[in-house]
Image (spheres, rainbow, N blue to C red):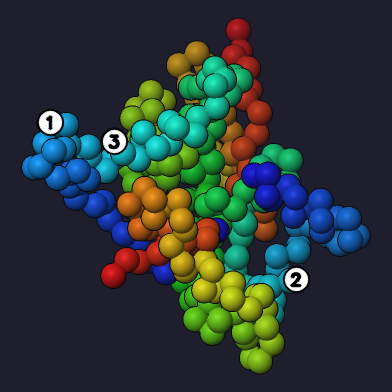
Amino acid sequence: MLINYLVRLGVEKRGEEYLSFPQRALFDKIGVRTMVIETDPFGNFLTQGYEFMSGRDWARLGNLYLQDGVWNGERMLPEGYAKFVSTLAPAWEEDKRPVYGGFFWIKVG
Amino acid sequence: MALLVATVGCQTEKPAVEAGGPAAQQAPVSPRDALIARAKSFELDTPYVPPPGDPLEHHASGFAKVMCSAVFITGLNPAVAAENVGYFTAPYAERAKFNTPVIDRAAKAVHVTIPNGATLTAKYLGSQGCVTLPAIPTRC
């Protein structure tokens, strides 16, 4: 929740509209039309779940990561980010539970 | 945010410390116990303070929210959703304490009433999905 709020502060500091930010900044560019990111009563995105979109749109997001964050030649995610999210996080390695990367559950083996 | 790369089921627990040798005197430590011990080592020395408010109201609010999204966004049958969806937000055991959620399709809202009479509501607001609303106090 704290990260979500920091994102809100950053977006609004730039004078941009917060609630349409994900659609403008990412989803429009990769052809996602059905994403709903739910908010709390104060209009802050929840994002630890509570996202809904069609299976085809989830696949579009998956394709973005499969393509290392590049879509039609345009880099959408920072270089190395796709590798970061799919790399086992140190704390989970320490706990011998090799299931979580950077915000992503990962498949082991 | 996304659950893309895949999910993994529960792991079989094996002793982290094998019996035998000098360590044989110690009881084996399961991975789960080792995990909890490591987490405890990072705990701050402060008393636990639960979130303010009535826990039952929180659970009811979560149940209304899960049901609202399942019915008005995903399009599930309410009975199927109540039985199968969203245990993280609304634990299954807690659901038994409530009456069957009231689905108001005209207003696109779900109401869950708890035993003390308060009603928790989640309302579908279009592109923002379903949002929980403050509890409506008991009517006398």
Which residue position is annotated with label 3?
B33
Badge nearest the viewer, 2 or 1? 1
Q: SS of the residue at dot 1?
A: helix
**Mark number displayed over residue B25:** 1
Q: Answer yes or no: are tags 3 and 2 on the same subunit.
A: no
Between marks 2 and 1, how big is the CA–CA gap? 62 Å
Question: Where residue A98 sits: x, y (%)?
Answer: 35, 58
Q: SS of the residue at dot 2?
A: helix
**Mark number displayed over residue A24:** 2
Residue at 61%, 13% in the rendered image: B139
Tag count: 3
Between marks 1 and 3, how big is the CA–CA gap? 18 Å
Regarding residue A9, the answer to whether it shows in the image is yes
Q: Is residue A14 above or below residue A26?
A: above
Question: Where residue B53 sits: x, y (%)?
Answer: 59, 19
Q: Residues within 10 Å of mark 2 (few under 14, many from 20)?
A: few
- The residue lying toward the viewer, choosing from A89 and B70, is A89
Q: Residues within 10 Å of mark 1 (few under 14, many from 20)?
A: few
Question: Where residue B18 sits: x, y (%)?
Answer: 14, 45
